[in-house]
Amino acid sequence: MARIGIFYGTSSGATLEVAECIQAELGGEEYARIHDIAGCRPEDLARYPILLLGTSTLGCGELQDDWQAFRPDLERMDLSGKQVALFGLGDQADFCQSFVDGIGTLHRIVVNGGAEVVGYWDAVDQFEFGRSAAVVDGRFVGLVIDEENEPERTATRVQGWTQQLADELEPASSH
């Protein structure tokens, strides 16, 4: 059984596409399974020791609709003993004051739930934005993708982040 569950919420399909790229970089369905959060229950997340949670950010910093609907369940979950990594899509040009705030929201929830967050990403200087709830201690809380303005950089960003993630997760898979 796959050890990694990739859960995404999408309004336009772009977050699913990034989830599929991440899955491919991590070794395919044998290692990582993709789930649309719209059809999930807490038990679906609970069966994986490693969770990758992906969301777009809507409007002025709102969590994607399917994640917003699942939010009460996620807030009640005990995530102790789980490793969680985040990935988010946003638009740095049109929403520069709330850039990828969605993963900032998910980050707060999973930290409060006791998860060990992995995959913090030192790429803040690769984007031009004013403010983001997804920046903690000078780093993004996870992978950031801007499909609106920089789609040509997505594959390289996914490759770099998944390699970093594999290195961070390696110690956990050895015990």
Image (cartoon, rainbow, N blue to C red):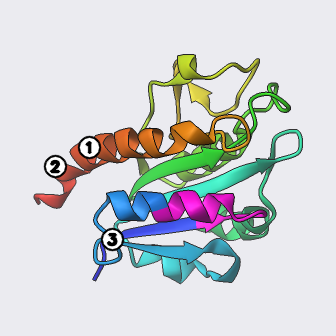
Which residue lies at the image location 40% right of the left edge and 64% below the top edge? Answer: 23
Horizontal and vertical percent for residue 94?
Answer: 85, 31
**Residue picked out by circle 1:** 168
Determine whether 32 is above or below 97 in the image: below
- The residue stretch that appears in magenta: 8-20
Tell me the mark number nearer the camera, choosing from 3 and 2. 3
Q: In the picture, residue 73 is in which quadrant?
A: bottom right
Q: Closer to the N terminus: mark 3 or mark 2?
A: 3
Residue at 26 percent across and 49 percent down: it is 166
Magenta stretch contains residue 16: yes
Q: Which mark is residue 171?
A: 2
Few, some or many residues within 10 Å of mark 3 (<14, 14–19, 20+)? some
Amino acid type assigned to the residue bearing label 3 in the image: Gly
Q: Is residue 56 left or right of residue 113?
A: right
For label 3, the SS is loop
Quick one: SS at disc 2? helix
Q: What secondary structure is marked by label 1?
A: helix
Disc 1/disc 2 C-alpha distance (Å): 7 Å
Percent x, y for residue 68? 78, 62
Q: Position of residue 22 (x, y in %)?
A: 43, 57
- Name the amino acid, label 1: Glu
Q: Is residue 72 above or below residue 33?
A: above
Q: Is residue 63 above or below residue 135?
A: below
